Image (tube, rainbow, N blue to C red):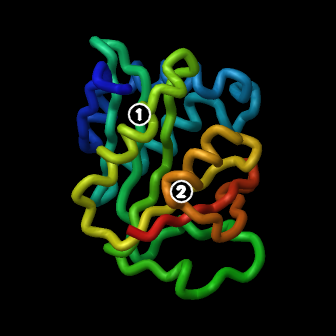
Amino acid sequence: MNDDLAVARHDGEGLRAQQDDILAVYREAYAERLDDPFFYPERFWERIERGSYREGFRLVTGRVQSELVGFTLGSVLPADTAWWRGFKGTPDLDLVRETGSRTFGINELQVRPAWRRRGYAKAMSEALLADLPVKRVTLLVRAENIPAYTAYLSWGFQVVGQMQPFDDSPLYEAMVKEL
């Protein structure tokens, strides 16, 4: 189904070299939310660029011919990570304990609307997670994003709670998948 999708893995430098293309995908994927300050493209870029300097950062791009149709990115969570800040309620201490090599956090998975429902998100996710020396993967998803939410459940992720990682961010479902 996705034989025409060319996936490639990049490091932080690769992310920064593709800023214009990444932001073009972002603007299409989040078109209906761009009037919310949390979703301003400049704020989005600031968040992902900061993360691109982390140890264990990965970006996977998906291109059809030369057009960037989607990407996913994340990094291994450091022992002193702020990932779990904003967890609602009292989390299981084992859930939020990080060692610096235990968990990979997926920060973004985006596919341009015209290219969705072709298996590209799953193909890019598999490439992102391939050969990772971690025990589990975590991500955040808005519950009202039904296509993404149901896809993650079908890929083996389980909801572990709700999080609001920034004061002005939406409330997200926190999901974890054991590898």
4 to the left or right of 78: left
Q: Give the quarter of the image for residue 67.
A: top left
Q: Give the mark, 2 or 1, whose residue is nearer the N terminus.
A: 1
Q: Residue at x 24, y 39 (%)?
A: 9
Viewer-closest of 129 and 31: 129
Q: Residue at x 72, y 64 (%)?
A: 162
Residue 53 in view in this figure: no
* Residue under label 1: 71
Amino acid type for the residue under numbered disc 1: Phe
Q: CA distance from mark 2 to mark 1?
A: 15 Å
- Pick the quarter of the image with the C terminus: bottom left
Q: Is residue 61 above or below residue 63?
A: below
Q: Position of residue 155 (x, y in %)?
A: 49, 53
Q: Position of residue 134 (x, y in %)?
A: 32, 69
Q: Give the quarter of the image for residue 27.
A: top right
| Callout count | 2
Helix, strand or loop under label 2: strand
Amino acid type for the residue under numbered disc 2: Leu
Q: Position of residue 86 (x, y in %)?
A: 68, 66
21 to the left or right of 132: right
* Residue under label 2: 139
